[in-house]
Image (cartoon, helix red, strand yellow):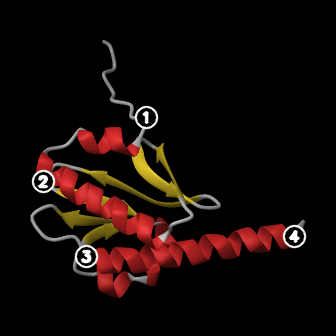
Amino acid sequence: MENKKTTYESIDEYIANFPAEVQEKLQTLREVIQAAAPEATEKISYQMPTFALHGNLVHFAAFPKHIGFYPDPSGIEAFKEELSAYKGAKGSVQFPLEKPLPYELISKIVKFRVAENLEKAEAKRKKK
């Protein structure tokens, strides 16, 4: 049997694969992440839209009933109280599609991850 797994080359291509109302949420989410991490680069990693700055910052993905946001376990832990209203796991949170995404909270989490990755990169640079 042939595996028909979709592979994406860009975040634009990924977003275009969804219904208009989901595309709108994904595009706004992307813009919020870009604004919070303007130096980050976009890529597809694990077949999900990913932002990277000295390593992966955050991933996101759309599912039938939610948008998954993956800010690393540290990003979940640092904001666990604010994220407690949502389903999640060690390194992920699920934002239901029928509710507005918490863009302000997402921006804070992304900025936290930027600071964390910059700190790690600086520590690594000092070791050399």
Residue at numbered disc 4: 127
> Is any atom of residue 29 visible in this view?
yes
Q: Position of residue 9 (x, y in %)?
A: 43, 34
Image quadrant in which you'd find residue 52: bottom right
Assess disc 3: are there few (<14), some (14-19) or many (≥20) residues with their C-alpha within 10 Å of its C-alpha. Answer: few
Between the C-alphas of marks 4 and 2, the distance is 47 Å
- Mark 2 to mark 3: distance in Å? 16 Å
Disc 4 marks a residue whose amino acid type is Lys
Question: Disc 2 marks which residue?
Answer: 21
Of callouts 4 and 1, the N-terminal one? 1
Q: Quadrant of residue 68?
A: bottom left
Amino acid tagged 3: Pro
Q: Which mark is residue 9?
A: 1
Q: Nearer the viewer, residue 41 or 83?
A: 41
Q: Residue at x 57, y 64 (%)?
A: 39
- Indicate left or right for 2 with 66 as reference: right
Instruction: Say few, some or many: other residues with alpha carbon within 10 Å of mark 1 (under 14 / 14 to 19 / 20 or more).
Output: few
- Specify the quadrant of the image occupied by residue 96: bottom left
Mark 2 neighbour class, 10 Å CA radius: few under 14, some 14 to 19, many 20 or more: few
Q: CA distance from mark 3 to mark 4?
A: 38 Å
Residue situated furthest top in the rendering: 1
Give the quadrant of the C terminus.
bottom right
**What is the number of the mark on residue 102?**
3
Give the amino acid type for the residue marked by disc 2 in the picture.
Answer: Glu
Q: Residue lying furthest bottom in this view?
A: 81
